[in-house]
Image: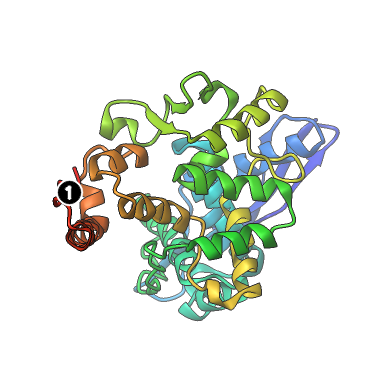
Amino acid sequence: MQKVWFRKSKNAWFATILEGGRQKQIRLVNAPDDKHGRRLAEDQLLKELAARDYSVEKESAADPVPAWATVSHVVGAFLAYSRGEHSADTAAWHKSLLAPFVDRFGKLRVTRLRKKHVRAWVRDKGYNPTSANKAIGVLKRAFNWAVEEEHLPRNPIAHVKKPKPLSRNRVVTPGERELILGAIKDAAFRRFVLAMTLTGCRPGEVARVTAADCDLTTGVWVFAKHKTVKKTGRPRVVYLPPAAVELTRELVASRPDGPLFLNSRGRPWTRNAVRMRFRNLRKKFPDLKGVIAYAYRHSFATTALENGVGIAQVAEMLGHRSTDMVMRVYGHLGQRVEHMREQAAKAAGVATPGAIG
């Protein structure tokens, strides 16, 4: 991306762009000569690059490409769009995934972008198949957006295949849970993992819960604003076992404002930070292959069903609108548990227990 600079005599930020084959200075924004001012100027530059009706340079007669179309410009324009159209969390996630790609390939013209560049990025970042699937998906989305907005004639990485993500159906066994908790020296991360273990929450739910979401009298977390509200028509309620209530009580007392679960630096947990922690655990313990943060949610549901909790109740605890999702993923468990309960009843010489509800 072109650099922006501050002109003291004008008390404004400027940049030089290429237009009609010539360099042209443009005034971006009146803002202070500080980090905030620079960020405003960079945002405005991205908007200018995306919105202007640029003259066209032709690398070939059949493939006209705007003169500004470097990887940095396309991704930067998409991130500016993302900040305006998506939630702050989603926009930050997009930036965390795409920034390393721009750092390495930002100066590359779009017409020179190839599959090998994407593969090198994924390899160097050490992404597992699930993370690579998401990262490539967001990168392709950025270029698809540029095509839809008619900033580009085509997506140069449209045919890059995403690896199949790791199955979320990996169960974290009791022994593995003990191993992981024992290996975590960081108290803040241990609390985060313990909360996932006790509640079956999505990692993002643990990361965002605040004191205002907690009702310690009834022992629940209540998310009035949640991605599932549109589907279910009701708040997302997380039912807390006693150990989770006590953990929540301790955190609420010390953190009445903002997220309860913070990292050791006092900052909210990000998807990437949690992903890296589990990646390090898998490196340290090869037998933990496939264990990701989301596996704790699957393990919670699996354990509940194996202990005889009804499918309807498991669906409620997971925050699903109906039992359909639980039946698709865990239906076989319900059948197996019911069968084994029947066999246990026969072995004990007692009446067959009722079906799991």
Categorize mark 1 by other alpha carbons within 10 Å: few (<14), some (14-19), many (20+).
few
Q: Which residue is mark 1?
A: 353
* Residue 284 to residue 347: above or below: below
Residue 10 screen position, x and y as percent: 80, 31
Q: Residue at x 67, y 22 (%)?
A: 256
Closer-to-camera residue (29/284)? 284
Closer-to-camera residue (62/320)? 320
Closer-to-camera residue (329/153)? 329
Q: Residue at x 64, y 26 (%)?
A: 252
Q: Residue at x 48, y 70 (%)?
A: 290
Residue 2 screen position, x and y as percent: 67, 55
Does residue 9 appear anywhere in the picture?
A: yes
239 left or right, relative to 356:
right
Instruction: Identify which amino acid the numbered label 1 is placed on.
Output: Pro
Residue 59 screen position, x and y as percent: 46, 74
Does residue 19 appear anywhere in the picture?
A: no
Q: Residue at x 64, y 45 (%)?
A: 191
* Residue 61 to residue 212: above or below: below
Give the secondary structure at mark 1.
Answer: loop
Judged from this view, the residue extending furthest toward the right is 8
Residue 317: name its quadrant: top left
Residue 155: name its quadrant: bottom left
